[in-house]
Amino acid sequence: MRSLFLALVVVGAFAASAASASRIILPGTTPSSAQRYQQWMAQHGKAYKDAAEKAHRFEIFKSNMEHVERFNAGKHKYWLGLNQFSDLTNDEFVGLYTGYKRPASKFNSPKTSFRYENVSVAAVAATVDWRKRGAVTPVKNQGQCESCWAFSAVAATEGINKIKRGKLVSLSEQELVDCDVNGEDDGCKGGYMEDAFKFIINNGGIDTERNYPYDAAAGSCNSKKEADRAVDITGFEIVPENSESALLKAVSGQPVSVSVDAGGNFQHYKGGIFAGPCGTKLNHGVTVVGYDADEDGTKYWLVKNSWGTGWGEKGYIRMERGIDGVKGLCGIAMDASYPTIN
Ligand SMILES: *[C@@H]1O[C@H](CO)[C@@H](O)[C@H](O)[C@H]1NC(C)=O
């Protein structure tokens, strides 16, 4: 009797392990994390220098995947997903794919005039989407280069050029990365949107994307292309800081360069209205190209990023607007500016 009981236990255990093994192998069942890693690697064309690196990245991937699944199982205004950044820790990610660097001297920068100061918040359009008015080029990809600042400044410049002159021209981030090197902007090591506007002003314009294309690495300045001034601006202005209503007034008039803290869930954002939590340690430059609210009334900023179309909502993120606290979500209202054409 006793031995029969033991035999049954052994058979039972064997059956259970066989079942869990088949759960891993059979199609149509939940794949193991190792299988998902292989799948993800193939999807994103990932290759690692050796087995140790691959194993190390697998551990990070697993922890990111678990974070994504745990988060998505809860009730939130947004959701996360796997993307090209899923094998990076959050610190690595912020260190490689952002690039906002505000010079120390700019923390007390003199206020500029603000041409939207007398615009009434009550009078601005209820919703704005500069894409629908043809003032936004397709989402670009900064790659592994801390050049967000160039993408943010260029997107705002493309916008005002279309609004003032009627033509949407894709402009050259590479020119800023290569040629805007005599101040504090530093190619793939970070820079500042206001300084990029200053470069464009002083240079008398900026070349087209087509003529001076992006290659995600800092090179020497092509002075011949630098002299091709396809689009110029006459100035730039700073949005009064720590005011989402000032930002609203500015965005009602044109796409605006803003700075955010892109740590935390930004890395894994897949869709919905991003609501943090996030800090206000500004580290990333992006461009607000509109605002709206969803069906249940949650207000948001429509933000163009420069991480390709595989991240977020086809390269965009909707960030909650009108939050408690003057800095805005992730500090979006702390340091915003825009180019002007008189
Ligand atoms: C806003 O209104 C004030 C008072 O009328 C005026 O002095 C100022 O120049 C106006 N600002 C702009 C940008 O038009």
Image (cartoon, grey):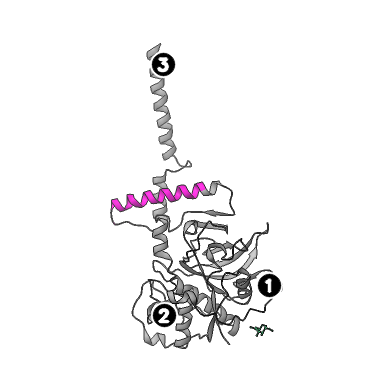
Q: Earlier in the sequence, mark 2 or mark 3?
A: 3
Quadrant where the C terminus is found in the figure: bottom right
Which residue is under mark 2? 175
| Residue 44 visible in the picture | no
Q: Which residue is mark 3?
A: 5
Residue 80: x %, y % from top left: 51, 54
Q: Nearer the viewer, mark 3 or mark 1?
A: 1
Q: Main secondary structure of the magenta part?
A: helix
Mark 1 residue type:
Val
> Is 295 placed left or right of 235 in the picture?
right
Give the crowd class for mark 3: few <14, some 14-19, many >=20 residues within 10 Å.
few
Q: Is residue 318 above or below residue 167?
A: above
Specify the farthest residue to the right: 122
Circle 2: element type: helix
Q: Is mark 1 within 8 Å of ligand 1?
A: no
Query: Is 235 displayed left or right of 180 in the figure?
Result: right
Q: Position of residue 337 (x, y in %)?
A: 54, 76
Tell me the CA gap for discs 2 and 1: 37 Å
- The residue at 42%/36% (across/down) is 22
Decide which of tag 2 and tag 1 comes sooner along the chain.
1
Q: Earlier in the sequence, mark 3 or mark 1?
A: 3
Q: Which residues are magenta?
A: 47-70
- The front one of 127 and 83 is 127
Residue 112 x %, y %: 55, 81
Residue at 53% x, 82% y: name it: 236
Q: Residue at x 43, y 32 (%)?
A: 19
- Find disc 1 in the rendering and name its residue: 121
